[in-house]
Image: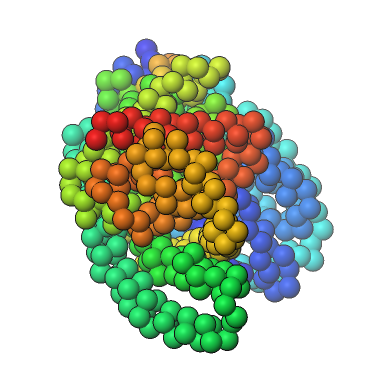
Amino acid sequence: MNLLAAFPGKRYIVLKIKDSKVRQQANCLGMGEGEDVFCVARRERGPVILGRGGQLVAVGGEVARGIQIAPLRAKRK
Amino acid sequence: MVFTNLTKRYAEVSNYPGTTVDISRGFWQGNLVIDTPGIYALNRSNDEERLTETLLEDAEVIINVVDATGLRRDLYLTLQLLGRGVPMVVLVNMMDEVRRQHLYLDLAKLESLLGVPVVAAAAATGEGMADLAKVVGTLCATKKNSPSRVQGSELRSRANEIYGEISASQEGIQQLSPLDKWLTRPLSGIFTAFLVLALIWWLVAGVVAGEVVDFTEGIVFNRWLLPPLVGLLQRVLPLGLLQNLLIGEFGALTMAVAYGIGLLLPLVFSFYLLLSLLEDSGYLPRLAVLMDNTFRPLGLNGKSVIPLILGFGCVTMAVISTRMLSTRRERIILAFLLGLAVPCSAQTGVIAMMLTTMGYGWLALYGLILLTVFLLAGVILNKTMPGRSNGLFLELPRLRLPRARNILRKSWAKSMAFLKDALPLFALGACLITLMEYWGGLAALETLLAPITHTWLKLPSEVVSAFIMGLIRRDFGAAGLLTLNLATGQRFVALMTMTLFVPCIASVLVVIKEHGLLIGIAISLSSLAVALLTGGLLAAII
């Protein structure tokens, strides 16, 4: 699924970022491929606001479409 | 802020990423200190990163200022800097915020994991600056470290590991604050944006342009300063050109200085004060989120709203800040739109003064036409320019209460920069017009341009002097319209034409520096063409 399908309040793992510049930026901010992020807010056509460790990043609709994510299930105790 | 604390020199600080696009230099304890642009990594992926890389080649000591509340993010750059082997201290800033949020960071452990000194600080209050001085003193005598071996893709995972070891706080569910939600949701966000704009307009056009300028121009200059000065110079100077150049109708003192300081400085200062409040509160990035979808048809993303709003302060500075956009295509489109349809603070102040006296209907029409021209030009540029623009990817800083000291220092520094930049050009423009008038060139030019001014724009021929001033600086030209006796419709046509007129010399020079001579000329000529076309059409309709 891509980032535009994320639900606010849910946690996801970033699988793939299509655009190389965005991939680099996301990696610097700790939201790159393999990282887990919160979907904090989302508009239907974007932007999506992601959160991680107190930081917030706004991702425009077109960029969000190129980011593949998967839901991160809570670990059972 | 750390740089200002150390060198006592002001470096601009704002609450959004990409504030510092240039470098600042100062001295601290006899050593040169260079404030590099704010970056998150050294990937040579933009001008700021390349500039920082170049500066690092000669650095003897690195002071790596990291944000304690965003340490996980900033450790990536710290690890990259360690890789250079230059003696380094990590200054963990904003520790006051960490304590306020009841977070915990083990800085002793961080020091042992990184292998370089770590100092806790809160630059806003001066905390940690004495400790930094001691550490840097020791580091100056240190030889180069052996470079760290963490490279490439390992950097992020190592940064995460280090953060995990020094931070005791667990990541909970993240939510937007109620204020964040209010500002980024379409309905409430647009309502707030209109409210903010209306408030700015009321303060600048109503309070400052009315009350303050009445005092500074009407009383201080026209009653207290100029009459005795003009009287004195009339006695001392011989009649003729020299007297005209200084105290004539377009004199350097009676016009350039009186306009620059008496009329424009209060407007510019008040505008910068309000813009600084927006910048420092963190509101602008929220506006970028709100406007992202609106900007897409123009080939821009929401981030463009930041230079655009800054353009209402100074278009020249705004053109420089377009560097925060990631593609050349976006930077050129925005530079064009800034040059064409964004009046700077001084110009907006004068226009506000004139439109307010004309009535709200004219004000609404002015806004509507300007917006239409802006959108049309953006859409045309997006359709015709090759390449594609990038989407939005923008870090949202925390919303915070702006600090009065920073707001005042920043507004003062920018206003002084305005005077330094504008006054010589005003004086030059005033001298040029006086010389032309003295030697009969102004009358000849008025006749020559009559088909444009008189026939096409339906304006009196005296308007030529205002447009000549506008060629030098649009705000100076707009101020020149104040003295002309025009009917309401003519005044509106003249104002609209002047708003869309060629950008000021300083902006054009910056565009040439950033994008080349061809783009600079293209922007100036297109602005002139659009201004005359719009003005002529309006003159025919009104």
Q: Residue at x 57, y 56 (%)?
A: B440
Q: Is residue B148 above or below residue B225?
A: above
| Side of B92 where B149 appears, left or right | right
**Residue B431 seen in this snapshot:** yes
Give the colour scheme of this rendering: rainbow
Count of numbered tags: 0
Residue furthest top in the image: A1
- The quadrant the C terminus of chain B occupies is top left
**Of residues B228 and B93, the one drawn nearer to the viewer in this rendering:** B228
| Side of B268 where B218 appears, left or right | left
Q: Residue at x 43, y 31 (%)?
A: B530
**Of residues B59 and B534, the one drawn nearer to the viewer in this rendering:** B534
Which x, y percent locates residue B476? 46, 56
Which x, y percent locates residue B231? 47, 85
| Side of B193 where B159 appears, left or right | right
Which x, y percent locates residue B81? 68, 46
Question: Which quadrant holds residue B320?
Answer: top right
Which x, y percent locates residue B364? 21, 41
Q: Residue at x 68, y 69 (%)?
A: B27
Q: Residue at x 75, y 55 (%)?
A: B59
Residue furthest right in the image: B143
